[in-house]
Amino acid sequence: MIRFGNDRRVRVVLLVVGVLCLQAGLGFADSNMPGQSQEAKRAEKRALIVIDDYIIGPEDVLEISVWRNPDLSREVMVRPDGKISLPLIGDVKAVGRTTVELRDDITEKLKSYKENPTVAIVVKAVNSYYFYVQGAVAKVGKLPLLSRTTLIQAITLAGGLNPDAVRSRITIFRLGDGAAPQKLVVSYDDIILRGAENVELKPGDTIVVPSETMVLLP
């Protein structure tokens, strides 16, 4: 039989053990709870999707498979002119289309050469989703746009603003889709302090953060 010389010490030890067991039980229950926390995680992941239907861009790498026709199947990179080249049908426009739209176009063109062709397209590498940052930030250059990214997030990815940055004159240059390019002038402090719109970036955007020495006009 084990004999304890100090009952008070025993009670303290038992109390500590009980608390640790309770915390472990709560942690286990929380980790297995299928309620709001899991739904919040799923919603957070869904929010990272850039768009529901991926739009093909220049330099993207596509794997195009034609069922039972290995000679027609290949991996291609989208050229700067927005097209890809395939056997039999030649050049096909890819930029600005979803994989479904491109698949349907290739299928239709192949019908002149094959009966009921079955085409599948997989995006092997995403190289067209990026943005540029220039000016008074810690890191300038080309950065990948792999998820929905706001202006504030983009500046964070660029290492933040330099001390001499003109926070009220941040400019976003945006290439138009067949339209004239856009120029958006945004105030960093208005977004942070006054609830102004935190602009969501688009592929190809260029952010210019002027410094105090760059600003010549009021």
Image: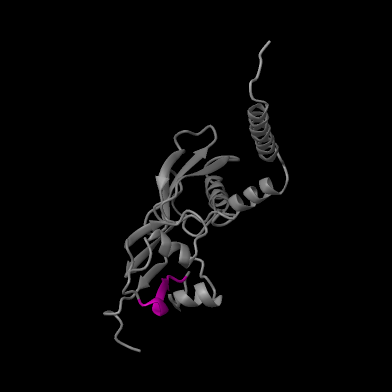
Q: Is residue 6 left or right of residue 140?
A: right
Quarter of the rendering containing residue 49: bottom right
Q: Is residue 203 visible?
A: no
Q: At 46% from the left edge and 38% from the top edge, which residue is drawn?
A: 72
Is the C terminus in the top left, top right, bottom left or bottom right quadrant? Answer: bottom left
Q: How many marks?
A: 0
In terms of depth relative to the viewer, which is nearer, 93 or 121? 121
Q: Position of residue 4 (x, y in %)?
A: 65, 19
Q: Is residue 38 above or below residue 167?
A: above
Is the N terminus in the top left, top right, bottom left or bottom right quadrant? Answer: top right
- Residue 12 in the magenta stretch? The answer is no
Quarter of the rendering containing residue 58: bottom left
- The residue at the far top in this view is 1
Q: Is residue 60 left or right of residue 200?
A: left
Q: Position of residue 126 (x, y in %)?
A: 44, 50
* Residue range corresponding to the magenta coloring: 166-176
In terms of depth relative to the viewer, which is nearer, 114 or 100? 100
Q: Is residue 99 left or right of residue 71?
A: right
